[in-house]
């Protein structure tokens, strides 16, 4: 028997099998510790509390209070959106991925220091952009420095993503044959497409940052910004979230494993939907926009229904779990289930908007609502739920009940509800002041949810940093 190059089978407790290890090979059990990525999870949470949900709360209150718009408004909205998608969602997902994917592959992380420098560059770039773009819009005397910071931030984000993509690609080439890792093979198309579109999107974003710096503009062109946001949201974040869920939900919730063919069809719909959506943003063609809505709606409906979350047979815990574990995972499970309930709602809204548009009877569903039902409703609650389950295990913390996570469940779902319903009501013609008040409260609820979650996981991350 000859072992594949670079792969070393291991006995229980990590003892390598004698005679099967190539000279100079590294055992797959020699994984990098959690402290490699823990500081960057802290950075992602800090960005979400400030330029992400913090700035979002300010913008929601300003919009609800009828503050007059100025040139600063689109710049702040764009800074908030990129901070959320890159600094919070992107950095959080990539940090967890660099810790989790090598274990799923059965091989050590290929270049730990390159991965760490990539996360650092991505995080610093997100911070620079979050600080620089509002200052550019404000027209301060140091605008030249701020424009340089905006361009440098975009370049750092792209360089950081490049380093992370190279690290993960090299890691995937290690270990046993991919045919032996069926769980990884099934989600590999999602990972390759998501990471590839992230790289392309950040390259385009860096070019836009340089253009804004050279032309002394205050914000990105509207079409370009929409295409960038949609490529990051539907082309990167959504496929990666589906891929991670396809591997973790059967383990933690006992739901059905989605068969390879339906999962591949789900990938085709989300990949095609993301590409068509970006094309619609660039060209402005309503037919492409309607088609993208149909494709994205099918994806958002298919995966929750195929996997049985939030409906269908499932278990809240494994029978072998101790009582302390059962109590500890109660509220994280609620967060994950509610996240997939929001994904189902997103599928209904996308499908209704797409079919109506292609039929020639457009529904008045703002694009802002469609984006936030995915971001605030699905992605944020999924990150909070999965993070509350994974981080204690990664940090080797003893499982214990966390009643404060009930606040996260309530505030997180309330934030999504108040972020989606008021714009729909306004689109339907509602003019009541209560609609504006509810919209203003959405940002406060979201900030409360992420703040309480941060207070829960921060000590675990600090111990690892």
Image: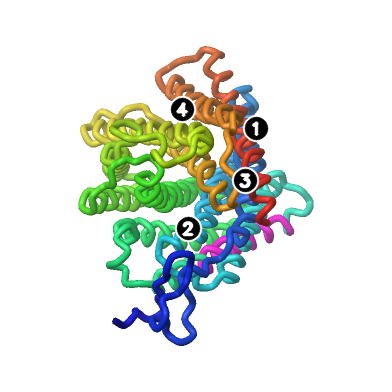
Residue 89 in the image: state x and y as whole percent.
52, 48
Tag 1 residue: 58
* Mark 3 or mark 2: whose residue is earlier in sequence: 3
Left or right: residue 113 versus residue 283 is right
Residue 90 in the image: state x and y as whole percent.
52, 52
Mark linked to residue 45 = 3
Tag 2 residue: 100
- Magenta includes 155? yes
Mark linked to residue 184 = none
Q: Nearer the viewer's eye, disc 3 or disc 2?
A: 2
Quadrant where the image shows the N terminus:
bottom left
Q: Residue furthest bottom?
A: 23
Query: Nearest the camera: 143 or 314?
Result: 314
Q: Residues within 10 Å of mark 4 (few under 14, many from 20)?
A: many
* Mark 1 or mark 2: whose residue is earlier in sequence: 1
What range of the chain is rendered magenta? 145-163
Mark linked to residue 420 = 4
């Amino acid at each position: 028997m000859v072992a594949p190059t670079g792969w070393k089978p291991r006995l229980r407790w990590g003892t390598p099998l004698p005679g099967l290890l190539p000279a100079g090979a590294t055992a797959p059990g020699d994984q990098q510790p959690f402290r490699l990525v823990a500081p960057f999870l802290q950075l992602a949470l800090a960005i979400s509390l400030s330029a992400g949900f913090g700035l979002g709360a300010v913008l929601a209150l300003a919009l609800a209070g009828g503050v007059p718009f100025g040139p600063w408004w689109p710049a702040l909205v764009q800074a908030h959106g990129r901070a959320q998608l890159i600094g919070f969602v992107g950095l959080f997902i990539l940090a967890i991925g660099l810790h989790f994917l090598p274990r799923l592959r059965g091989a050590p992380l290929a270049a730990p220091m390159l991965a760490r420098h990539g996360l650092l560059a991505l995080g610093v770039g997100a911070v620079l952009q979050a600080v620089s773009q509002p200052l550019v819009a404000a027209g301060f005397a140091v605008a030249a420095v701020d424009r340089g910071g905006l361009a440098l931030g975009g370049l750092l984000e792209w360089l950081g993503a490049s380093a992370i993509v190279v690290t993960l690609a090299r890691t995937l080439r290690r270990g046993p044959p991919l045919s032996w890792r069926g769980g990884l093979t099934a989600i590999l198309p999602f990972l390759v497409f998501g990471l590839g579109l992230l790289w392309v999107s950040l390259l385009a974003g860096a070019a836009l940052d340089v253009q804004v710096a050279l032309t002394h503009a205050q914000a990105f062109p509207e079409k370009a910004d929409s295409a960038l946001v949609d490529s990051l949201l539907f082309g990167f974040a959504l496929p990666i979230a589906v891929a991670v869920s396809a591997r973790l939900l059967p383990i933690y919730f006992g739901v059905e494993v989605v068969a390879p063919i339906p999962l591949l069809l789900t990938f085709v719909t989300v990949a095609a939907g993301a590409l068509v959506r970006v094309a619609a943003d660039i060209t402005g063609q309503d037919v492409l926009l309607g088609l993208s809505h149909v494709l994205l709606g099918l994806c958002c409906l298919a995966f929750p229904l195929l996997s049985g979350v939030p409906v269908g047979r499932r278990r809240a815990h494994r029978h072998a779990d101790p009582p302390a574990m059962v109590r500890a995972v109660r509220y994280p499970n609620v967060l994950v289930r509610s996240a997939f309930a929001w994904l189902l709602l997103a599928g209904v809204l996308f499908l209704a908007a797409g079919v109506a548009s292609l039929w020639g009877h457009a529904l008045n569903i703002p694009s802002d609502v469609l984006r936030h039902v995915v971001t605030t409703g699905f992605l944020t609650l999924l990150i909070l739920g999965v993070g509350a389950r994974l981080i204690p295990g990664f940090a080797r913390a003893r499982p214990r009940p966390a009643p404060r996570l009930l606040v996260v469940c309530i505030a997180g779902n309330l934030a999504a509800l108040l972020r989606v319903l008021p714009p729909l009501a306004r689109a339907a013609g509602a003019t009541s002041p209560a609609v504006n008040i509810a919209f203003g409260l959405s940002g406060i609820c979201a900030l409360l949810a992420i703040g309480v979650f941060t207070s829960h996981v921060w000590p675990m991350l600090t111990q690892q940093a």
